[in-house]
Image: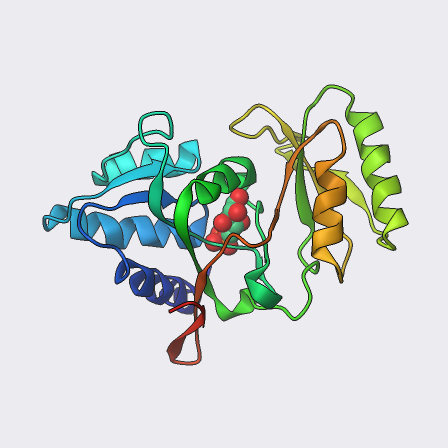
Amino acid sequence: MSADMRELKIEAARAALDQVEDGMRLGIGTGSTAEEFVRVLAERVAGGLTVIGVPTSERTAALCRELGVPLTTLDETPELDLTIDGADEIGPQLGLIKGGGGALLREKIVAAASRRMIVIADKSKLVETLGRFPLPIEVNSFGLGATVRTIERTARALGLEGALKVRERDGKPFVTDGGHLIVDASFGRIPDPRALANALNAIPGVVEHGLFLDLADTAFVAGDGEVRTFGAA
Ligand SMILES: O=C[C@H](O)[C@H](O)[C@H](O)COP(=O)(O)O
């Protein structure tokens, strides 16, 4: 990642940090942008801010522990005030694609448990139509072949074609924190994300998918010397 790109992520993270108030229960996202948020948050915590966070991945949990951000779980703290997370794409009405880092299931559970969700990103994430970024779909490993065929058939019925690939890392299937696999679906364009989300939700074997619709309230997007606000300020 270039130094400029990192700087944009830090700018967006700082804008989100301004929304954090003392005593808040936070959902803490995953990925390179969310990690910049953890870093700026940790500085504020070291300076006396009192917050408690639910991490959306083991990776984020490890960084929070390393930097001294206090953690809890959704079992202990089932309602959160604010979640701050990155995204792979930000489309119309703050519809998102997430899961490039494989954390989409915990991210969606945490976002759904939060009163408010803020997305932070650099401007490369803004799109007019979702789908250029391959849609991550988390699936149970049992029945993988059948589930992939059903996803393919379901997508085709909605006019969506494209390669479905089981994600690999170092030549082996990528396994999520929840012990599942990820199928990346290269549809190119998803003109009706709601229809696809509903159809995917109905497939046995699909654990969750990376379409985040009606979850984000605000996006802070950094680029061209400013941080733009989308949605509720
Ligand atoms: O699973 C990962 C998450 O959904 C990330 O928030 C997303 O992939 C964006 O990551 P990054 O900020 O590294 O682009």
Q: Dividing the image into 4 quarters, which one contains the C terminus?
A: bottom left
Q: Pinpoint residue 134: horizontal percent, then vertical percent.
A: 69, 51
Q: Name the residue at 74% across, 40% down.
A: 200
Q: Pinpoint residue 229: horizontal percent, then vertical percent.
A: 42, 72
- Left or right? Give the position of 195 relative to 112: right
Q: Name the residue at 76% across, 33% down.
A: 203
Residue at far left of view: 48
- Seen in the picture, residue 151 relative to 75 is either above or below; the reply is below
Q: Name the residue at 40% across, 53% down.
A: 116
Residue nearest the observer in this picture, 165 or 80: 80
Tell me how many marks there are: 0
- Left or right? Give the position of 145 relative to 139: right
Q: Pinpoint residue 187: horizontal percent, then vertical percent.
A: 78, 54
- Left or right? Give the position of 110 relative to 140: left
- Left or right? Give the position of 161 relative to 205: right
Q: Name the residue at 13% across, 47% down.
A: 46
- Seen in the picture, residue 126 relative to 45 is either above or below; the reply is below
Residue nearest the observer in this picture, 213 or 46: 213
Q: Pinpoint residue 41: horizontal percent, then vertical percent.
A: 25, 51
Q: How is the image coloured?
A: rainbow
